Image (spheres, helix red, strand yellow):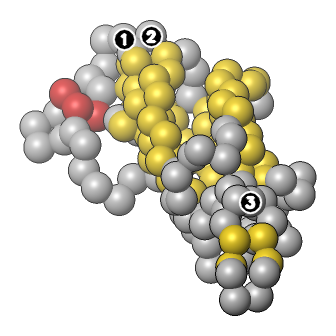
Amino acid sequence: MAARKDQKRRLKIVPATARKGDIVTVKTLAEHEMEPGVRFNPETLVVYPRFIINKLICRYSGREVFVADWYSGVSANPYLAFKLRAEESGTVEIEWVDDYNQSTFARAELTVVDAAAPAAGDAPGGGDAPGGGDDATTG
């Protein structure tokens, strides 16, 4: 029971361009029903089996920088945001792993500029505009 194709994975880095050493926010969202395995249907006498995303892994330029272990108490369509220090331009990749050891991925680029150059939030009219990041890819 891998993730359905219509269940999207989203990733956004705010801001997508930062100076070296700046702190950016990584925002993730996974569309998933997160079935905890305790629901009982009295008409059919069926207990729905557990099917959750149990791990989120963040890689920055290929290095693992953040891991979250999730359990049955996590809500459907889990959202997670965390901070990351911008050290070099590269790809930020999020991997969600479910109970059946199936993985789905989302990737976004983080651009790091010299400390003397203005970052995205410093330019007039710049900042946290909606729609950043790449749409998810399923792997």
Task: Give the labeled residue for mark 1.
Answer: 115
For label 1, the SS is loop
How far is mark 2 from mark 3, CA to CA? 43 Å
Q: Nearer the viewer, residue 85 or 40?
A: 40
Query: Can residue 128 be seen here?
Result: yes
Would you name the residue on which mark 3 appears?
37
Residue 4 sits above or below residue 67 on the image? below
Q: Which callout, 2 or 3, points at the residue further toward the start of the chain?
A: 2
Where residue 4 sits in the image (x, y, percent)?
Answer: 72, 76
Q: Residue at x 47, y 28 (%)?
A: 82
In this view, the mark in front (3 or 1): 3
Crowd class of label 1 (few under 14; some 14 to 19; many from 20; radius 10 Å): few
In this view, the residue in front, 114 or 120, is 120
- Check if mark 2's residue and mark 3's residue have beta carbons within 8 Å: no
Can you identify the residue that label 2 sits on?
Answer: 21
Tell us which disc is closer to us: 2 or 3. Answer: 3
What residue sits 56% from the left and 29% below the top? 89
Eye-nearest disc, 1 or 2: 2
N-terminal of the pair, mark 3 or mark 1, is 3
Classify residue 60 by image quadrant: top right
Furthest residue toward left: 124
The percent position of residue 107, horizontal first and vertical second, equals 62, 49
Amino acid residing under circle 3: Gly
**For the residue carrying disc 3, how many other residues have a C-alpha within 10 Å: few (<14), some (14-19), or many (20+)?**
few
Q: Mark 3 and mark 1: span between their CA atoms?
A: 50 Å
The residue drawn where x is 31% and y is 20% is: 117
Task: State which quadrant residue 16 falls in.
Answer: top left
Q: Are marks 1 and 2 in contact (CB under 8 Å)?
A: yes
